[in-house]
Amino acid sequence: MKAALVGADGTLLHEARRATGRERGAEAVVETILGFAAELLAYGAEHFGEGAVAAGVAVPGIVDAERGIAVYAANLGWRDLPLRALLGERLGGIPVALGHDVRTGGLAEGRIGAGNGADRFLFVPLGTGIAGAIGIAGTIEAGAHGYAGEIGHIVVRPDGPDCSCGQRGCLETLASASAVSRAWAAACGDPAADAADCAKAVASGDPAAVHVWQNAVDALAAGLVTAITLLDPRTLIIGGGLAEAGETLFTPLRAAVEERVTFQKLPHIVPAALGDTAGCLGAGLLAWDLLSTEVSA
Ligand SMILES: [Zn+2]
């Protein structure tokens, strides 16, 4: 878990981390979240004169931000958890916002990170899977049911590998960091080899690595062009483990996207800037947004 005290302009004032400890079960994890937030509130009061005036929390899985409910998270084992109400109670009644982890990280990347305040952007982290956050005029589009932005499950190769979602050839089965790790481990014969090793081999000109890498880049470009066609973003922010390959990824990716577009306008394709603090910075922005909405209402 990452937590932060965030200033009104998005400045990171204080950051803390702690183990999720999900093997202890859902209830213990929730208690850790509440206790961690309460400690942070006290820390702020002690070190910054006044305590936090609002709080934001971002969690994975299916999130109903409007009702403040963490609906479902397979890996944390909770269902219909009223996290906003629980947190508000523990923090003495200050306003609390609840968000989805990727969309909240995307909000921070778009507003104060790599997006540099872009009015229309798409944030795509390439990690174990591939997710997305659609930024529109300072907010993230969640969709009617909370599923907007799931670019990892756009089918790019209908005859491709089976995906956990039930389809075949989804983008994340071909271009996530895990997919590249699997493909490179098979190609080089070392089961421990991962995507970062593949990127290094690509940089040193290994033809087998270049083949694996280009396959992933082509699939990624196909998925991104579908997104560009639908959304017309000004900036495309690519994050997650695979983006750490830097220009080894971005140079061929920009070329592959450019090759595919016809009438569509090319967005700026940039690496994410906030790393794994994006989520807690975004949660801070959600909290501040809550206050400005309250003030204007
Ligand atoms: Zn899928």
Image: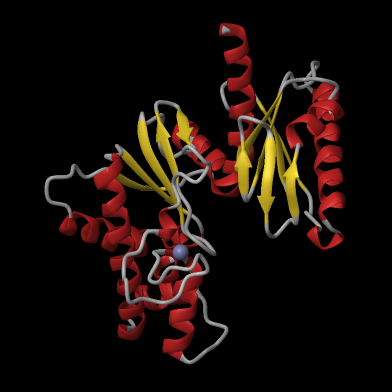
Residue furthest to the bottom in view is 189
Percent x, y for residue 224? Answer: 31, 54
Q: Is residue 11 visible?
A: no
Say above or below: 131 vs 288: below
* Residue at x 62% of width, y 37% of height: 64
Residue 240 in view in this figure: yes
Residue nearer the viewer, 108 or 136: 136
Quarter holding the C terminus is top right
Q: Is residue 254 left or right of residue 179?
A: left
Pick the residue in front: 235 or 7. 235
Furthest residue in direction top, as rendered: 296
Q: Residue at position x 40%, y 37% from top?
A: 115
Q: Horizontally, is 78 left or right of 45 in the view? A: left
> 38 or 297: which is nearer to us?
297
| Relative to 54, 188 lies left or right | left
Residue 97 position, x and y percent, is: 66, 29
Total numbered labels: 0
In the image, what residue occupies the spot 69% across and 42% down?
70
Q: x, y percentage for residue 56?
A: 68, 31
Q: Which quadrant of the view contains residue 76?
A: bottom right
Residue 158, relative to residue 297: is it above or below?
below
Q: Where residue 174 sits in the image (x, y, percent)?
A: 40, 70
Q: How is the image coloured?
A: secondary structure
Write down the quadrant of residue 119 in the picture.
top left
Which residue is pictured at 84% across the width and 27% down the height?
Answer: 89
